[in-house]
Image (cartoon, coloured by chain):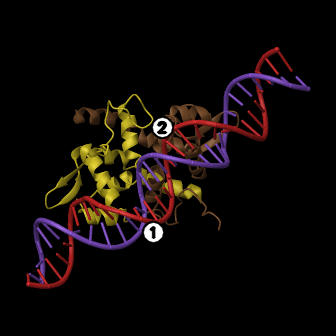
Chain colours: A brown, B yellow, C red, D purple
Amino acid sequence: MTKPPKTAPRPGRRVRGSTTGRPVMVLLDLLGRRWVLRVLWELRGDPLTFRALQAASGGLSPSVLNARLAELRDSKIVEQRPDEGYALTRQGRELLTQLAPLTAWSEKWVKSLG
Amino acid sequence: MTKPPKTAPRPGRRVRGSTTGRPVMVLLDLLGRRWVLRVLWELRGDPLTFRALQAASGGLSPSVLNARLAELRDSKIVEQRPDEGYALTRQGRELLTQLAPLTAWSEKWVKSLG
DNA sequence: ATATTTGCTACGATTTCAGTAGCAAGAACA
DNA sequence: TGTTCTTGCTACTGAAATCGTAGCAAATAT
């Protein structure tokens, strides 16, 4: 009995909670996994080594970080550069651009929470 | 022995992987929990009843849905309206507006994945 | 009165994550 | 050449989150 392969969600395939595989559902599934948003966020600047990324993201366990990085590489959002470490791909940077306004929103949000 | 209270992440408090409690970190923690992005997405239109929301989100278990809704209500992103069901607050709608361009991005993204 | 729908709670099984230890490969130094 | 660091990552165990299903009380419809 071999283990089922664990891959990143991919368009066309069935995704958690969606039989359609619609792109945005696939994306929401991918981004909704623990630490993914945070890891992307920490990669918004310069490339980081595995260990630096782990520290920046708040010390998540290396096994989980490695799993998330595998998914993100598989999805062409993150890439590994020799002698530099992990970095966003061009696509990944675009994605993060979409997410950037969240900072401003979150500032207003916390005020409303008192 | 009472159960430890499980609350939504809140600014100022320590959040998973961050001792600073910076707003954007708190937000990333909240949004990074499973099903949260999907649930918000499904609420982008009209209000939905608990069961309708559960079905729309792909049949997640009611206990998890209830937990997520509690967190989102606590965070003033979602509200429960009598005789209507669950809906985004004004803030929640603003947040989703920030996330809306993800659809377009995800379309391009899937093409690049072949 | 009976049947349905709705908003949940309970609970055991399964999956994921946390936390720590440690190893192989390469660079830096002695 | 040997030793020490750093880096990227795997292994392992226990804890926590999630799944999947069952079911119940209140409200509504028939």
Q: Tell me the residue at 58%/57% (across/down).
A: B113
- Left or right of C13 on screen, residue B95: left
Q: Viewer-proximal residue, B19 or C26?
A: B19
Disc assigned to residue A41: 2
- First-in-chain label (2 vs 1): 1
Give, as a three-letter code, the residue at label 2. Answer: Trp
User: Tag 2, which chain?
Assistant: A
* Pointer 2 and pointer 1 on the same chain: yes
Q: Tell me the residue at 42%/50% (across/down).
A: B102
Q: CA distance from mark 2 to mark 1?
A: 29 Å
- Left or right of C21 on screen, residue B6: left
**Other residues around mark 1 within 10 Å, as few (<14) / some (14–19) / many (≥20):** few
Q: Tell me the residue at 49%/66% (across/down).
A: A14
Q: Give x and y (percent) for residue A76.
A: 58, 49
Q: Give x and y (percent) for residue B31.
A: 38, 46
Q: Which quadrant would the N terminus of chain A be assigned to in this image?
A: bottom right
Q: Viewer-proximal residue, C13 or B60?
A: C13
Disc assigned to residue A19: 1
Q: Which quadrant would the C terminus of chain A be assigned to in this image?
A: top left
Q: Give x and y (percent) for residue A112.
A: 23, 35
Give, as a three-letter code, the residue at label 1. Answer: Thr
